[in-house]
Image (tube, rainbow, N blue to C red):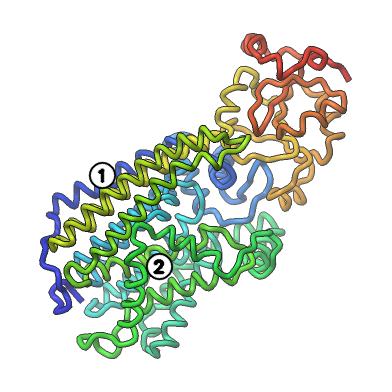
Amino acid sequence: MTESSSEETLRDPLPSRRALLALGALLAVLWLGVLGLRDLVPTDEGRYAEIPREMVTTGDWVTPRLDGFKYFEKPPLQYWATAASYEVFGIGQWQARLWTGLSGLFGIAFTALAGCLLWGRRAGLYAGAVLASCVYWLAMGHINTLDMGVSACLGGSLLSFLLAQRDGVSRAAERGWMLGCWGFMGLSLLSKGLIGLAFPGMTLVLYTLWSRQWGLWRRLHILPGLALLLAVALPWHVMVQLRNPEFFHFYFIYQQFDRFATPDLSRPGPWYYFLPILLLGIMPWLGALVPALWRSGRRSLLPPADESPGSLRARRVLVVWAGFIFVFFSASHSKLPSYVLPMFPALALLLGEYLARARSRALGWQFALWALLSLAAGIGFTQLWRAGTSVTPAALYQRFGWWLEITAALGLVGALAAWRWERRGRRSLAVLALALSMFVGLTVATQAFQILGRTASTRDVVTAIRPWLHEDQPFYTVATYDQTLPFYLRRKVTVVQYRGELDFGIDQQPALWVPTLGDFAARWRAAKLPLAFMPSGELPALRALGLPLLVIDSTPRYVVVARPDQDYGAAARRARARLPAAWNPPSLQEKQP
């Protein structure tokens, strides 16, 4: 269906090609330009920055390692992409987030393209604007996790399938898009495992059971597609299994099945766990979500008269895709907020088509609703200081709240402008005004999170102890493992009396681990120029062992200690002279075992 359809009720002109290129360039510059402004925070950001760093330093791109331990929880696509970024641009924060940022941009661009080819330029423009400005997609596009990468790959498989099976496509184009679908499925397998097959496969099965369009299976190009999928995904799985016989059971049985079916990871949640995440994440388009889903569901039951009986019902595919993902993860015993991110390209397409087809001046109440929500949020942010704790003081929450006020104000201005232009029949200006205001506002909010994130990151800790650092010195992390620490140190650390997510790797390589404080004490006494990082509460236990300890940095979360009876060099001597006396009472500074 194109813009010339009789259902098209809007007559306002779309922006010119030059204006759209300018908006696209602004989107790309702002989207990518802020990737390095915030510190990496645990857990995911540090982990998925450090594993590629170890790939680069060791030269082993087959066996993922975290702090030297084998780490088979996830496949390697993002590790490879980030390691390649390090090789080209050097190791740093924005390089660590580059794959995530590019994946988010790709998802927006591909969603807009699919909307254009399925339902016309207006629907494509609106779908891209929705995805670029919704809270969850923008936020996750700037956090170094695997979820944005796998969402972009899964979205690529879904959208390629829709474009391959649309009416009027040539046989060559059908084959090309279907090969793209299979290729994206292979990349999804390399990005986050078997969901790369499960989501597209179950969507197809459920759709054909619903629509009874069995002939669709003859247009999937299964043999060449399967060959492409295996060529993309199989080599790494074979190589890593040959090098690591323990890989198969842990990766396929435990990670892909046990964690879904059992509560082993202690990530439970009620059946409605993802509902508030979805409602918050789709903002500022919340008012349009229910009407869009209702309209799409109703139209998927009774296709328009201009569609042939065998035509693919794209809206139904999108509804099945989003619904299956939501139900699948709601039924899981292991829930994390980011799991439903692959729903969002499908929802953005449905929203874009709805916004393009809704009757003229019909969306005013939805823009007015967002204006009210923005006003309420602005009032609520004034009370954010109440969330303060001893670790993250109220003053920091208050500062963060001031920046969030800018986001709320931009949301209010954008919503009022959209409401006015909608009443004047200028739908494109209305949609773009709200999308642009929220994109800028949410970009401000995500970067302002540095105010809080800085307290969780170890970047400042590493900067403070730099005078004490020496190549190849022992560096211990006691009773904890902060995933950002090795990345900022640019080296591995030795874990003491802690297992956590390193549990599997410790079982495979126990020699890299120090199991007890007693073992650590023996190493500490024998080490040359050692340093140790630990939660603040662990310091009394170590002092009770009679160890010589000098606190060289202290935060509400952590302390770092050195040996007071060893010379770390002139820079360390100068730094030691400036240490607060409260950190090291004179009776403890030179205590010998």
Please say if 29 is above or below 360: above
The residue mark sitting in front, 1 or 2, is 1
Q: Is residue 148 left or right of residue 439?
A: right
Residue at x 32% of width, y 42% of height: 30
Residue closer to the observer: 541 or 239: 541
Residue 321 picture location, percent across and down: 43, 73
Against 223, residue 29 (above or below) is above
Q: Residue at x 31, y 77 (%)?
A: 295
Packing grade of label 1 (10 A; few <14, some 14-19, many >=20) is: few
Quadrant in the rendering for residue 168: bottom left
Q: Are marks 1 and 2 in contact (CB under 8 Å)?
A: no
What is the crowding at mark 2: few (fewer than 14 residues within 10 Å), some, or many (at least 20)? many
Which quadrant holds the C terminus? top right
Q: Is residue 81 at least partly visible in the picture?
A: yes
Residue 277 image label: none
Amino acid, disc 2? Ser
The type of residue carrying mark 1 is Leu
Pick whichever, 32 or 333, lies toward us: 333
Decide which of 247, 527 is in the foreground and name it: 527
Name the quadrant of the N terminus. Answer: bottom left
Residue where numbered disc 1 is placed: 26
Question: Badge 2 is on which residue?
Answer: 157
Dividing the picture into quadrants, the one containing residue 303 is bottom left
The answer to whether residue 188 is visible is no
Q: Earlier in the sequence, mark 1 or mark 2?
A: 1
Residue 537 rendering spot, x and y as whole percentages: 75, 34
Q: Quadrant of residue 555?
A: top right
Say left or right for 547 vs 95: right
